[in-house]
Image (cartoon, rainbow, N blue to C red):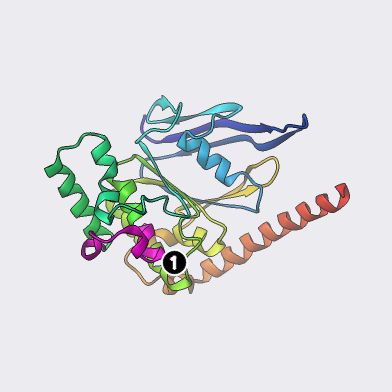
């Protein structure tokens, strides 16, 4: 079976004082190969915890992750992660960063050079390949991070707030690039974001998660990611359904935040 299956996933963190935090509770989801999922929710809803379990960085308290018919037991090149800060090797050139994964796999130099050059063309960094990472802007660094992830040819790309630190114009350009890569590569992508607009633009499917214990509150299937491939994203945002869904989800998350604040005040 191809695709990703999240089966009855729960995660509890035990605290030094003997207490515990239930970060996730009975989360289940099936993703077909090539689907693009955005995950949204208030602070403390377990978005990043869920992503880290799928990545293999955390072992769940209950449940499991199944990818292409086998259980996920830890980190693996079949799942690539793009972080909010690129987590790049700043002392290396752009070309060396993108080629790091293939080098670790022992890929022949000629084959690695072909892979790196193709990906640098895709993300528009061919003219910067010999630059050191620290010489690049934040947007360029995230392009390097995407190319480095793709160089390992993962089945699933996991993105944890990858565009959150960028200015508005650069962020929009990167959103267009994510949609372009999704369509051209056919990769399964799970993207965590705090931005409702970004979740709507980049989510073929969109999950709204509720906080503590983190669980799926509502799922949407949306047309905007498909509409946005190769298009002006500002035009996509003008679609009447986009505005309606944005207000609906903003109200939903606002109500959750109000509930969280009320709980905190009661326990104070």
Image coordinates for residue 73, horizontal then vertical, percent? 46, 26
Identified at 73% across, 32% down, the residue is: 16
User: In terms of image quadrants, where is residue 122?
Assistant: bottom left
Image coordinates for residue 209, horizontal then vertical, percent? 62, 48
In reply to whether residue 129 is colored magenta, the answer given is yes
Identified at 47% across, 71% down, the residue is: 168
On screen, 42 above or below 166? above
Of residue 249 and residue 244, the one placed in the foreground of this image is 249
In reply to whether residue 258 is colored magenta, the answer given is no
Q: Is residue 70 visible?
A: yes
- Secondary-structure class at tag 1: helix
User: In terms of image quadrants, where is residue 180?
Assistant: bottom left
On screen, 188 above or below 42? above
Left or right of 212, for residue 93: left
Identified at 15% across, 49% down, the residue is: 114
User: Which span of residues is magenta-colored?
Assistant: 125-143
Q: Which residue is mark 1?
A: 171
Left or right of 117, for residue 259: right
Image coordinates for residue 69, horizontal then vertical, percent? 39, 26
Of residue 150 and residue 89, the one placed in the foreground of this image is 89
- Rate crowding at label 1 as few (under 14), some (14 to 19) or many (20 or more) other CA atoms within 10 Å: some
Image coordinates for residue 139, horizontal then vertical, percent? 39, 64
Of residue 242 and residue 77, the one placed in the foreground of this image is 77
Left or right of 27, for residue 170: left
């Amino acid at each position: 079976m191809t695709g990703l299956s999240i089966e009855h996933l729960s995660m509890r963190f035990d605290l030094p004082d003997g207490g515990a935090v239930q970060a996730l509770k009975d989360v289940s989801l099936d993703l077909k190969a090539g689907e693009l999922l955005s995950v949204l929710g208030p602070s403390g809803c377990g978005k990043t915890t869920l992503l880290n379990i799928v990545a293999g960085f955390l072992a769940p308290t209950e449940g499991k992750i199944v990818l292409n018919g086998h259980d996920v037991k830890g980190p693996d090149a079949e799942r690539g992660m793009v972080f909010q800060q690129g987590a790049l090797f700043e002392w290396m050139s752009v070309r060396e960063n993108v080629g790091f994964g293939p080098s670790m796999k022992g890929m022949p130099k000629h084959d690695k050079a072909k892979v790196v050059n193709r990906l640098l063309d895709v993300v528009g960094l061919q003219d910067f390949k010999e630059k050191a990472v620290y010489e690049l802007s934040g947007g360029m660094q995230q392009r390097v991070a995407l190319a480095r992830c793709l160089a390992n040819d993962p089945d699933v790309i996991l993105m944890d707030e990858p565009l959150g630190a960028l200015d508005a114009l650069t962020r929009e350009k990167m959103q267009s690039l994510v949609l372009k890569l999704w369509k051209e590569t056919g990769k399964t992508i799970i993207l965590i974001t705090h931005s409702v607009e970004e979740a709507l633009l980049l989510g073929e499917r969109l999950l709204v998660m509720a906080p503590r214990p983190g669980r799926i509150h509502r799922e949407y299937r949306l047309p905007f990611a498909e509409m946005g491939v190769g298009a002006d994203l500002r035009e996509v945002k003008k679609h009447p359904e986009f505005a309606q869904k944005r207000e609906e989800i903003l109200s939903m998350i606002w109500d959750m935040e109000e509930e969280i604040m009320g709980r905190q005040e009661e326990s104070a």
